[in-house]
Image (cartoon, rainbow, N blue to C red):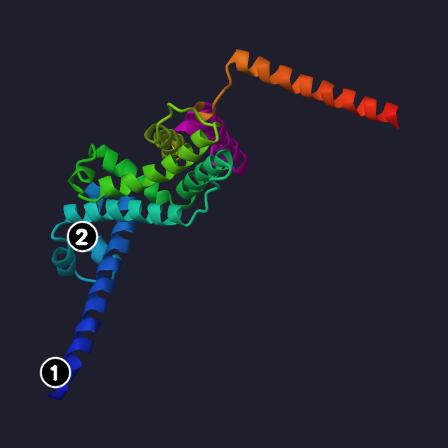
Amino acid sequence: MSPTAARKPGATGIRAKQAQDTRAKILKAAIKVFAKQGYASGRIESISKAARSHDRMIYYYFGSKEQLFVEVLETIYTQFNEAESQLHLDLDDPVHGLEQMVEFVWQYYLDHPEFVTLLSSENLHQGKHAKKSLKLKEISGYAISVVQQLLDAGKAQQVFRADVAARDVYLMIASLGYFYNANQYTLGAFLGEPLMDKAALAHWREVIKDTVLRAVRLELPASAATSAATSASAATTTSATVNERERGAA
């Protein structure tokens, strides 16, 4: 075997790693450029410059600006799911677990403004790029499944309504967080309030939690609540009577 042939597998591995790194750098740069300038104004030249690459490499790896943007959308959703997968949601206490979910989504929007900005940009284009993705359905399926686990745990413990759907809860959490962040400037001007102040952000986070929990928690019917209260009162009376007898016997 020649020295050249012996080096070939290693060289191939290095080239593959370089290609992977170049592709990742282009995607990272594209996220920044599209988030700042939008899809229409985001130029290939700006992306290649930010990635310290060349225009031809973008076309080589992604084919077109449009396909690059599709992969940008897939990437930011995947990153969201990856961050969510690190959560240790409390299935033993699904009410707390749902609060954890709300807090995560809310904080993710705050920590990743590019996520909100890119989705807003895509909505201006009526989701035409997202519709071309073959992966978003799978990605969204995971997000819904996480909520479903919490709801199943809550239903099993009879603390959540049996008729509540994971899709609806997901939309509630996402919309209440997204709308606030995406419209912070116009809403702030309209209401005359600093919506991004620490106190304002903490307040809205609690509003989301309260709204979601009110929607999913199981409320006992009035008759059941009365029965439960009567049982509790009877138990208290019985306990007091037993204690009185024990003191008398002593």
Q: Which mark is residue 54?
A: none
| Residue 189 drawn in magenta | yes
Q: Amino acid at mark 2?
A: Ile
Q: Residue furthest top?
A: 223
Q: Which residue is mark 1?
A: 5
**Residue 122 percent coordinates (x, y):** 24, 37
Q: Up-down: is 83 above or below 95?
A: below
Which is closer to the viewer, label 1 or label 2?
1
Q: Is residue 218 left or right of residue 114?
A: right
Q: Which residue is mark 2?
A: 44
State the image quarter where residue 151 is shown: top left
**Residue 167 percent coordinates (x, y):** 32, 30
| Residue 68 drawn in magenta | no
Q: Amino acid at mark 1?
A: Ala
Magenta stretch in the rendered image: 186-214
User: For the residue carrying disc 2, how many other residues have a C-alpha within 10 Å: few (<14), some (14-19), or many (20+)?
Assistant: some
The C terminus appears in which quarter of the rendering? Answer: top right
- Taking the spot 40% from the left edge, 32% from the top edge, the residue there is 173
- Taking the spot 18% from the left edge, 52% from the top edge, the residue there is 44
**Residue 240 percent coordinates (x, y):** 77, 22
**Residue 134 percent coordinates (x, y):** 17, 43
Q: Up-down: is 62 above or below 101?
A: below
Which one is earlier in the sequence, the residue at label 1 or at label 2? Answer: 1
